[in-house]
Amino acid sequence: MHGSRTATTKRQPGPRTMRVLGIETSCDETGVALFDSERGLLAHALHSQVELHAEYGGVVPEIASRDHVRKLLPLVSHCLAEAGLDRDDIDGVAYTAGPGLIGALLVGASTGRSLALALGVPALPVHHMEGHLLAPMLEADPPELPFVALLVSGGHSMLVEVRTIGDYRLLGETLDDAAGEAFDKTAKLLGLGYPGGPALARLAEQGDPSRFPFPRPMTDRPGLDFSFSGLKTHTRNLYQRHAAERDADVTLEADIAAGFQLAVVDTLAIKCRRAMQHTRARQLVIAGGVGANLTLRERLKADGEKHGWAVAYPRLAFCTDNGAMIAYAGCQRLLAGEHTGLGIAARARWPLDELKPPATEAAA
Ligand code: KG4
Ligand code: ZN
């Protein structure tokens, strides 16, 4: 008796080659991709819900779920057509099972699981953060393991030592707001739309980062944890103090945006340097939506050159949520023989350190 792990599998893929459909629906982006273990990424497509949520100033979970329902299957068909494949060419389905918005996750999980059942192939629940951590592996010149990853998104800020796929050691994390959340909230304060991170970064380009002093939170004490809520409050107080001059002071918002951005970038860079020294790693990887920030990228690249470590980033489209990272992560685990039964897995919360390397789980 093999139990539920193999009960749903009609055809066992060969050990070396596999074409995996990846599905990402954890938040406000519907992402789909096809990854081939030999040929690499065959197709990927993304539908962003930004416009749907913009008028509410943030993601509305019910609207997110309903839109995933509308967009997911058309995106699957689109990817298959782009890759010149049909459904029978899919050897496995990987879907984001958490962490994220539970309703949104359930759309991808139930669709992915059902598709796999209909096709007689294995399905695999993927951890969203594992997807982000492994996204740079999709690039032509992938980073070498082990590495230290700075994972900075709208919901998370963490430094993780990646020893091998599935062997992750949390080195530090945020005690309050995530870096992306701090960007989004500060952008809202300055009257920029949703999502705030990219808009704040654009405004910062026109500002003078040295006009106002900003703190570098938690850099004056040892450790690798972050805290951004004090910086957010500092920015709010600063903006309120200058409320009377807002109309006359045409660069006020841009100068605040630039000072805030530099404070976040400095803080992240200081912690990255500490993490690299602490682990003696030679490779740093930047992952998650805030990894799209060009000031952060330039700063970490310069630090890497100065201290002698390599810095890898996924392409900009794979820094933010996407299906390709889920297809890739799922493919590595499916190749090792890992898959689950007919249950639909979805977890709003799912600590990263619960993951294990694929071989260990497959053997379990
Ligand atoms: O990884 P992601 O797409 O979604 C999750 O949170 O999982 O990250 C989205 C976050 C948002 O907070 C967004 O404002 C931020 O990444 N972001 C940026 C930039 N692009 C996206 N923050 C700063 N600068 C950017 N260029
Ligand atoms: Zn994400």
Image (cartoon, rainbow, N blue to C red):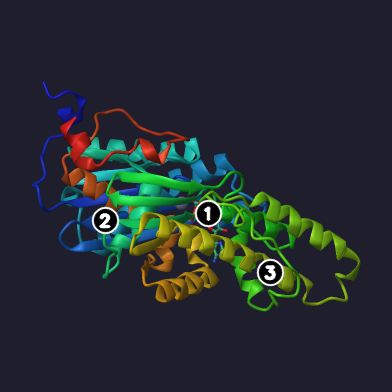
Which residue is painted at 27% across and 63% down in the image?
Answer: 82
Which residue is painted at 58% across and 66% down in the image?
Answer: 266
Residues at discs 3 and 1 in contact (Cβ within 8 Å): no
Which residue is painted at 25% across and 39% down in the image?
Answer: 123
Q: Residues within 10 Å of mark 2 (few under 14, many from 20)?
A: many
Quadrant in the picture for the N terminus? top left
Marks 1 and 2, how far apart at CA = 21 Å
Name the front one of labels 3 and 2.
3
Horizontal arrangement in the rendering, residue 126 relative to residue 13 (left or right): right
Q: Amino acid at mark 1?
A: Gln
Residue wearing tag 3 = 259
Q: Amino acid at mark 3?
A: Gly
Question: Residue 347: x, y in percent?
Answer: 43, 33
Name the disc covering residue 49, or none: 1
Question: Residue 76: x, y in percent?
Answer: 32, 52
Q: Where 54 falls versus 295 (above or below)?
A: above
What SS does tag 1 mark?
Answer: loop
